[in-house]
Each structure stands twice: as structure tokens, then as C-alpha cells.
Image (cartoon, rainbow, N blue to C red):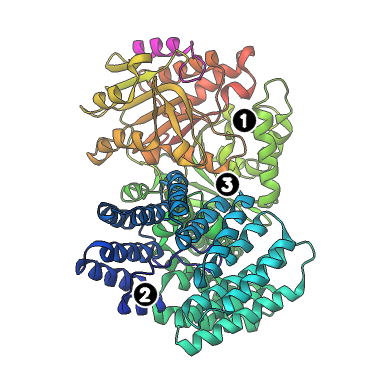
Amino acid sequence: MFFRTVIGAVLSVAAPTWADDGAARAARERCDFATEASEWEKSAQGVNGDAKIAALLARVRALRELGQNRVALETLDAAEALAKSGIRIAEVQAARGAALMYSRQAAEAEPLLRQALNAARKLRAFTLIAQVQNDLGILLNGTGDHAGAAAAFGEAAAMGKGELAARARRNLVDAWLGAQEFAKAKTALDSAVKAARALPTGHERIFLLLGLAKSCERLFNEAPEHDNLLRKRALELDAEAAKMATGQGDEHALSWALGHQGALYETERKLPEGLALTRRALALAQRLQVAELQYRWQWQSGRILGKMGERDAATEAYRRAIAALESIRNDVAIRYGNRNAGSSYRQAVGAIYYELSDLLLQRADGLKGAELQSVLREARTTAESLKSAELEDYFQDDCVNLLRAKQRGVENLSKTAAVLYILPLEKRTELLLSLAGRIERYQAPIGDVELTEKVRSFRLNLENRTTNEFLEQARQLHTLLIAPVEPMLKSSGINTLVFVPDGALRTIPMAALHDGEGFLIERYAIAVTPGLELMESGARGLRAPRMMISGLTEGVQKFPPLPAVQVEVDQLGKLYPQREQLMNREFVKARVTEKFSGEPFTIVHIASHGRIDADVRKSFVLTHSDKLTLDDLERLIRPGQLADKPLELLTLSACQTAAGDDRAALGLGGVAVKAGARAAFATLWCVNDQASAELVADFYTGLNAPGGTTKALALQAAQRRLIADPRYAHPCYWAPYLVIGNWL
């Protein structure tokens, strides 16, 4: 996987000056980082001492370009074991910090980089100071400390030489753009162009020029004056890079240069010229067999063709783009799933999926029968692929693949349930209703931006129990999203609605939508799922359940007590005599691990403070003396799924997500997927302790009733009972509860 981009900041990827390998250097010049890594591995095997460390560090550089951070960190372990002198230890620390920036341990990067920087200052190792400051600047820029980043890049540029100094100057432009200091960005841009042109002709100079062309474009777009000379300069820099790449025989760089020129022409509405350049870039990418470039230029071709009115050709280009992207999807999702990537997977490439879905749905106009169903299913499947990748991005692993193999036609699991897939597009929102083996298509006349604004207001007002201001948005959203499909729901005898929401819609409880007479939950049981392919679709397995109950009533770790939890636990104990129980001081990670070492549980109920954060590393469930992470829950629960004895229900009865945090809501929706459970029962926000105890008890009573019922119907009954209680009628008390995943 080739991760260098001409858009992002440039890491200090120079090999130690005391390391050289002609074959590895040649491989790097042609962007063949796999061969470069292999050559440095061979070099390391034939030497000892400092030379071996140098070869290992150079291999780490190539592995980082490939996105192979795990292998890079393992290689650094070997280098660290050999490092004896202060300078070598500092170099290894610096390399480890840079590698950790783009891994799941990103929080550990800054301390390591600062340690390496302090050591380099004491040793007066000016080149290492420049290298570390450049990497530290990238980290700070990624976390929003643009002023700190600019200071770091400034010192790197002053102390570094040649390529390193030029890279730091290029990165300084990004820091000033991030700070919206456009005059300083313009000055830094002029300096960076001069520094790049002073480098010897070759790979590094070409890519710096390409990156600076992107900086010109960004400065044009973001600065208030929109100076057209910046676009002209971008084209000139691209042309300069393309000429140099042609002379060097660097087809990889040439593909980048031509593709970016094509994008600039697209922006200026010079579509035929843009398409011609993009196709030349694509031909090179195909010859080189570089999937990252192929998906970019196929996507760009599709956009341009769409603007030219050639919808069928555009659709084919998008299909090829997604096929190329899917081949490297896991690597790309992992790459963007950290705080220093500058954006999430969805922000970086999510539009490609929705643009294709949009084209397909436009094509569906006028179609009938089997042909219509085929197009609608492709549009939905395309959006589904994005949802899978988003969870890989959020959780930083490929847990979703374990479910795909078990997918069994979720939409056909129940004759009385319908699945509503909501696709917010630029100018409209598509509603794809699945029932009885077919898809019915409806539209709402609202684009994604306006819909998001309504959803944000709805969520904020819902949490304010002192007013009914939420009703305005509740009715508007009902009119847009439910009213179009309700006649079909009624005529089909539907009693359960399963939502597959998207974006901001993940942050709200659909149960609280209102038709002017009553809440949606009063007419339908409701469940949500992060995607049709992202839920265990097996039959319900709650007979003779083995239950694990754990939680806190005491206030610990600066969190308040939850006194009503004891009532909740006592009631569950009566309903489920076959249980294990860990409360308060017994509820610690070691004891939980011990309990899970035996026969798999069918229900795990955790009544404790918890939070699902936009950063998965900050998501947790509170125990008495520590915290359970989502990785911890997976380690405990996943073995049952792998043994074909999956957890039927994971309950987090005091969990919460922040209002307006779409990414945190994505994480909540994926809790069952991550843990390996068929379903989760959780809350969008922290609710009244007493109301929670009553609702949870009613929910489990329904599940445990003779003859049984579905999880969604049990939750509906519990919510309706709270609505009927004047103390808890406001949706703030009952709406945040969700059945996520398998609702049966």
C-alpha cells in the first residue's frame, strides 16, 4: 500500500546519513517501497553495530511509506536492542515516535518525540533536531496546535539542510493555512518553492513541487481574496513536476502530476481537457498497478464524466474506482483512523460511495420490475460498503469481516419488520424501504446539510427536559423521513422498523419522532443497525440464558454514585436466577476476566458509567478501580462468537455519546459488531437513574415473559410504560435507549 500523498504533511523520511544502499535508493526513486524495505532488510543481515541500526531505521522509513506500522514498530524493537550510544537511542526514539503517529498508539508519539528532541539538543545533533521538530510539527498540526506546529517547522527549516529543510518549509505552509494566517502561508509558500527548486533534480524535488501545487490550490480556496494567480501557479508547478518526472522516467510522479492538473481543469470547468489529463494519469497508474492512484483517477474521471452529462460512462468509472479502493480499503481505513491523519476515512473518500449511489438512483428513475430492484440494491450495497469501512476506520481493525461471512439476508428475517435505509445526498434524501424481499424507493426534499442542521437541533432539544422545543424538529423529521413510507408500513402489517441511519442521524433516537398525535415508538417497535451486513442475523437464543450482571452503585474515580442500579440488579436477579454477579469492589477487570473464562454467557449486563468517544481509545466502561475499553470487551466476548456461541445481548445501561458527535454515535452503533455480540442495548445519553432502573427492568421482564418477544418489542413496551408515567413522559427519559443490531 502506497501512502505518500501530495496533499498531506511530509514526514522526515530521510535515512540516516551514515546508511547507504544503492539498490534500496534506486527502489525508493521509483516509489517501490516494498523492494526498498526488502533491500534494507538484506543490508541489515550483513552488518553489525551502527551500520545495522542504520539499515533497520532505513527499513522503517520504507515500511512507513507502505503503511506497515506494525512491522515498522517490530523492526524498531530490534534497532532499540542494538542502540547503546546516546545518539543512536535518540534516533530510535525519534523513529518510533514518527511511526506511532500513524498507529493506534498515537497518544504515545508526542512524549517519545519530545524525549528524542531533548536528547538531540543535549548532543547538539542539529540534523536530528530538525528531523524530530518536523515530525513533532506534523503531530501538533494534526491535533490543532497550528502555532506550535509552525514553531516546530520553523526550527526544522532553520536547522535542517537540503531535502529535510525543504520538507519542513512545505509543512510550514500547511501550519499557517491551518491557523488561517494566509499572509504568512503565502510567504512560507514562496520560501518553500524556492527551497524545492534548489534541490537536485529527482524524486524528492518532484513530489515537493506537487505538494506545493496542492498548497497553492488550498490557499486559493481558503484565503478570502481567492487570488486566481494561485491557480495559475499551481498549474505551473504541476507542469514543472511533470516535465521533470518525464525526464527522470518517474511514471509514478508523472501520474500524480497529470492527475492533479486534471483536477485543476475540472475545477475551472475545462472538462474535456481535465478528462484527457486524468485518463493519461490513469493509464500510468494502471501500468504501474498502483491501486491508490487507480481509484483516485477513476473517481476523478467519474466526476468529470458526470458533469459532462455522460451518466453511464461516469457510473462505470465510479464502479472501477470503488473496486480499486476496496482492494486496499482496510489499509486506507487504518491510515485515516488516527488523530494525525487530518480527516476520517469518510471525510477523505466517503464521497465516492455516495456519488455512485446518487448516480445509480438517478438511473433508477423510470425503471420498473427486476431492473429497478437490481439498481436499487446496487445503490444500497454501495452505501453499505462505506459503512463497513467507517467501522474499520473507527475501531482500527477489521472486526466487520467476521460478520460478513454470516450475513443471511437480514431484511427477510421477519415478515412484520421493515428496514429503512436512509441516504442523505446533496439535494435530496433517499429512503429505501426493504420489506417482503423487495425495496420500495421514496424521497425527501431535503439535502444533507439542511437535514444535519435539523438533526443537531433535535438532539440538543431532546436532552432539555424542561421544554418541549424538540417537538418542532420531531414533527419536521417525521414528515420528511416517516410520512412518505408509512402508508406502505400500514398496508404491509409492519410492527417493527429497523433503521440504518447515516451521519448525524446516528446521533438521534428515531423513537422520538412525532406525527402531531404521538411518538413513533407508540406505533412501531424500533431498532437500529450500523449496516445490513453488520449484524448477527442468527435466530434468537435467549432460552435458559446464562447472564452476567456487573456494575457500580458507588461513586468512584470522580464519577457520581448510581443508587438506583441496585434496584435494577435486584430485579434482574429475580428474573434470571442463572447468573454471575460482580458489583462495586468486585467489579474490576481481573474478576471480569476470570468470570468470562468459563462457558460463554448469553447476556452481559453492565450498569455503570460509560462513554463512547469520537476517539475509540477514549471509549470506556467504568469499573471500580479501572476501565474496560472496547478492546477489552472484544477480548472477553469474541471467543463465544468464534465458537458459534455468540453473546445474544450486551447491555450498557449508563453509556453516553456527546451531542453532535457523529463519530462517537458511529462507535455506539458498532459496539455489538466490535464485541462480537448479536445485539447491544445502550443509551445515546446518560439518563435519570430511577427512570433507567424502571425501563431496564421492564425491558428484561418483557424478554423473559412466557412465549417470549423480540428485543425491539420488549423495548417498545418498556418505553410506552414510561411515556404513560407523567414523571417520565418527556423523551429525555425514555428516548435514548436503543436496540442495536439483531432486534429479534
Looking at the rendered structure, the secondary structure element under dot 2 is: loop
> Which of the two discs, 1 and 3, labels the residue nearer the N terminus?
3
Looking at the rendered structure, the secondary structure element under dot 3 is: helix
Of 467 and 150, the residue lying toward us: 150
Q: Is residue 660 left or right of residue 680?
A: right
Looking at the rendered structure, the secondary structure element under dot 1 is: helix
Picture coordinates of residue 634 (x, y %)?
33, 37
Picture coordinates of residue 697 (x, y %)?
45, 16
Q: Which residue is mark 3?
A: 503
Picture coordinates of residue 678 (x, y %)?
36, 36
Picture coordinates of residue 620 (x, y %)?
44, 31
Under mark 3, the amino acid is Gly
Q: Which residues are magenta?
A: 556-575
Of marks 1 and 3, the one in the foreground: 3
Q: Which residue is mark 1?
A: 512
Query: Residue at (29%, 38%) from the top-left corner?
Result: 638
Residues at marks 3 and 2, CA–CA distance in whole angstroms: 37 Å
Q: Which residue is mark 2?
A: 32
Residues at marks 1 and 3, CA–CA distance in whole angstroms: 18 Å
Q: Residue 76 appears in which quarter of the rendering?
A: bottom left
- Number of numbered markers: 3
Mark 1 Cα within 10 Å, few/some/many (few <14, many 20+)?
A: many
Under mark 1, the amino acid is Ala
Of 259 and 372, the residue lying toward us: 259
Query: Residue at (53%, 86%) from the top-left corner?
Result: 244
> Which of the two discs, 1 and 2, labels the residue nearer the N terminus?
2
Under mark 2, the amino acid is Asp
Of marks 3 and 2, the one in the foreground: 2
User: In this picture, is 226 found above or below 89?
Assistant: below
Q: Quadrant of the N terminus?
A: bottom left
